[in-house]
Image: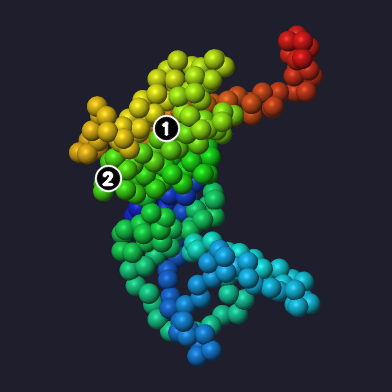
Amino acid sequence: MKYVSPSVKETAFNCPHCSALCTQFWYEAFGEPRSRNHPLPTVVGEEGAKLFNFDDIEDREFKKEMTDWANKMGKGFPYLEKRKKSQYVDFDLNNVSISRCYNCDQISVWIYDRLVYPTRGEAPPANPDMPEEIRRDYDEASTILDLSARGAAALIRLGIQKLCKHLGQPGKNINDDIKALVAGGLDPRIQKALDVVRVVGNNAVHPGQIDLKDDRATAESLFRLLNLIVEKMISEPKHVDEVYAALPEEARKAIEKRDGK
């Protein structure tokens, strides 16, 4: 699969959010002074968003707009919002750019030629089919790879533990989960990949024979292995199911009858 690194010199690259290789729309940034009534930045926070009460608003459309605004602000992430009325711009915010992904509609923020949001490290991009809670650990591990290979390995191990749970295991003991997956017909090669991440990640947390203090290459390999495991355990079955579902209904019924389902 072709990979184009995110860059201010490209109009299409692999999105830092969804990893899809697609068109990116670029925006300039402008500055407008805040009003005297609200001189400080609006910082809502996830808990603060729950405190907003718009029950007294009779206009249902406006009530929905305000509720959506509070929820979006509460997530703490930047997003684009079109102004209903054009206003004069007080400042050009130079050296700050915004790209918006055609595929997922999420935005990325750049200062000069550096991507500052979302934060991402030097690890390979996460598989698009990686579950969101695992993806967060993966991205966090990527951001600290330069600072701590041991910390990154430990987070990837945590991702493996969550992946086992996603695949139907208890998620409490990785060794037991892998054993159960093997009993269920897990590909031996994927078993090896799981065990590599389990052993290396565990020794990154507890003293053992593998010392990741200065071994960035070993930590980097764990990212590739986790992506491979997701590819084999989630992406490939998903693709097969999609192709199978596209078969004519009569053909699927005939197959199910043949297999006694």
Spot the residue most to the left. Answer: 214
Q: Nearer the viewer, residue 7 or 196?
A: 196
Give percent across and percent down for residue 121. Answer: 33, 48
- Which quadrant of the figure has residue 250? top right
- Mark 2: which secondary structure? loop
Query: If the image is split into quadrants, where does the N terminus sit?
Result: top left
- Which quadrant of the figure has residue 167? top right
| Mark 2 crowdedness (10 Å alpha carbons): few <14, some 14-19, many ≥20 | some
The residue under label 1 is which amino acid type? Leu
Which is more N-terminal, label 2 or label 1? 2
Residue ID at (34%, 72%): 94
Residue ID at (49%, 46%): 18
Give percent across and percent down for residue 165. Answer: 55, 33
Residue 141 position (above or below residue 217): below
Give percent across and percent down for residue 29. Answer: 42, 71
Residue ID at (56%, 31%): 170
Residue 1 seen from this side: no
- Mark 1: which secondary structure? helix
Label 2 belongs to which residue?
148
Label 1 belongs to which residue?
226
Query: If the image is split into quadrants, where does the C terminus sit?
Result: top right
Residue 247 seen from this side: yes
The answer for how far apart the CA atoms under marks 1 and 2 are is: 18 Å
Query: Mark 1 or mark 2: which is in front?
Result: 2
